[in-house]
Amino acid sequence: MVAAAMAAVAVAGLALTEVASAGASGDRSRSGHDKALQAGLEALVADGRLPGMLMSVRDRNGRVTNYTAGVGDVRTKSKVPTDGYVRIASITKMFTAVATLQLADEGKLALDDTVEKFLPGVVRGTGDGAAIDGRTITIRQLLNHTSGMPTGVPFMGNGILPVRDRYFETREMLDAALTQAPTFAPGQDRVWAYSNTGYMLLGLVAQKAAGRPFAEVVTDRIIDRIGLKKTYYPGPGDRDIRAPHPQGYLFPKDDRGEPTAGDLIDITRFDPSIAGAAGQMIAAPSDLNKFLVALQGGRLLKPGRLAEMRQTVDAPGLFEGWRYGLGVIEMKLSCGITAYGHGGDADGFQTRAAITPDGRAVTVAGTNDEVRQYEVIALFDKALCATK
């Protein structure tokens, strides 16, 4: 449900609005827009399988343009709300990583500490997972997915629909993961495997080190610190998305969980606790760009710690030229520029966000995570490389 930025109804309405972003980053509104980017969005929604698209582009001078295409609701044919809220899924990992690195700066943890130091006796695998042991897993390995923690999300064997209304404690998710076989020995040389359960575990570690609930850690240390007004970590039992937002959709499935023909299913409302610190958050595209600008500008991490965050390892399974750091993906773009960001797929939403070294930030989101991933990535690349 919350994969990384992986390999990646005819249009009933589309809109484009230029807006000024609030906050301390000095953003300014811009006149005009990139017609090629707008056309790219329209092409993505043309056959209705991907009902709606949102994109926010912050140029190198801080000017922001928000784009939309398609419909926000396939039933009512309403327009996609400009800069609406979406589930950002694994983009949450950047927030989790930043909070963890802040705790390291304060001496509350060290990246080479073991999980055992903070959760003594908790991480002990059973059955197929007998080799998993918190005494051999470090925080750094959780951050860059070299811990060997299982890759799948527990309780998702039949997709989201059977568990959409169920609340999960992170400890329950972890205990289920500990019965699954590890992908490799922790820190094994040149081995990498994306692990959502690893980041759920990381959230527990950060929570213990901070002495506060993890949602509060992220809110106080990041969201409130830099004035993100349209970003939040849903609380227990919060299954909805704040307004305005488009609806999120998925394809109907057969008994094996394979997509079948039929009307799209509205999956906007579900309990995101199944993702936890790996993918629970909700935000608007322009706010994710503000986060990226603040991170790159030194408002969240010291320069040395940001550089450490961007020290990457080979990441087989991501796009060619992409590597993984500490909760961030290094993306080699088609224009030769290197951007840093993340992607996320939650049921109903696919979202990508990144920033270039000179401060151009782009976030793009679509309202079906099961279709056109490659095309969305291609448009995302094009938007980051654009000069307007």
Image (cartoon, grey):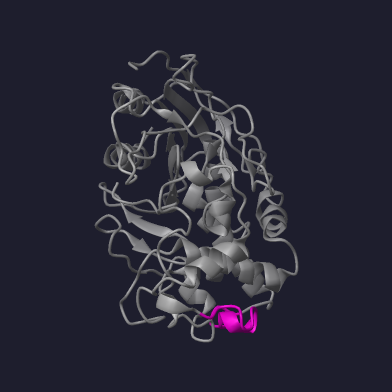
Q: Nearer the viewer, residue 231 or 234?
A: 234
**Quarter of image, res 212:** bottom right
Residue 105 against residue 239 in the figure, above or below: below
Residue 23 against residue 92 in the figure, above or below: above
x and y, in percent, of residue 94 in the image: 52, 57
Q: Nearer the viewer, residue 268 or 103?
A: 268
| View extreme (right): residue | 211
| View extreme (front): residue | 255
* 115 magenta-colored: yes
Residue drawn at the location 52% of the way across and 52% of the way down: 279
| View extreme (bottom): residue | 135
Q: Nearer the viewer, residue 318 or 267?
A: 267
**Is any part of residue 175 visible from this angle?**
yes
* 340 magenta-colored: no
170 horizontally vs 340: left or right: right
Residue 150 against residue 345 in the figure, above or below: below
Residue drawn at the location 57% of the way across and 58% of the way down: 277
Residue drawn at the location 38% of the way across and 82% of the way down: 185
**Total marks in image:** 0
Q: Nearer the viewer, residue 5 or 161?
A: 161
Magenta span covers which residues? 110-124
x and y, in percent, of residue 227 in the image: 69, 45
157 horizontally vs 175: left or right: left
Secondary structure mainly formed by the magenta segment: loop
**Is any part of residue 302 visible from this angle?**
no
x and y, in percent, of residue 383 in the image: 36, 37
Q: Quadrant of the C terminus?
A: top left
x and y, in percent, of residue 6 in the image: 33, 51
Residue drawn at the location 47% of the way across and 47% of the way down: 359
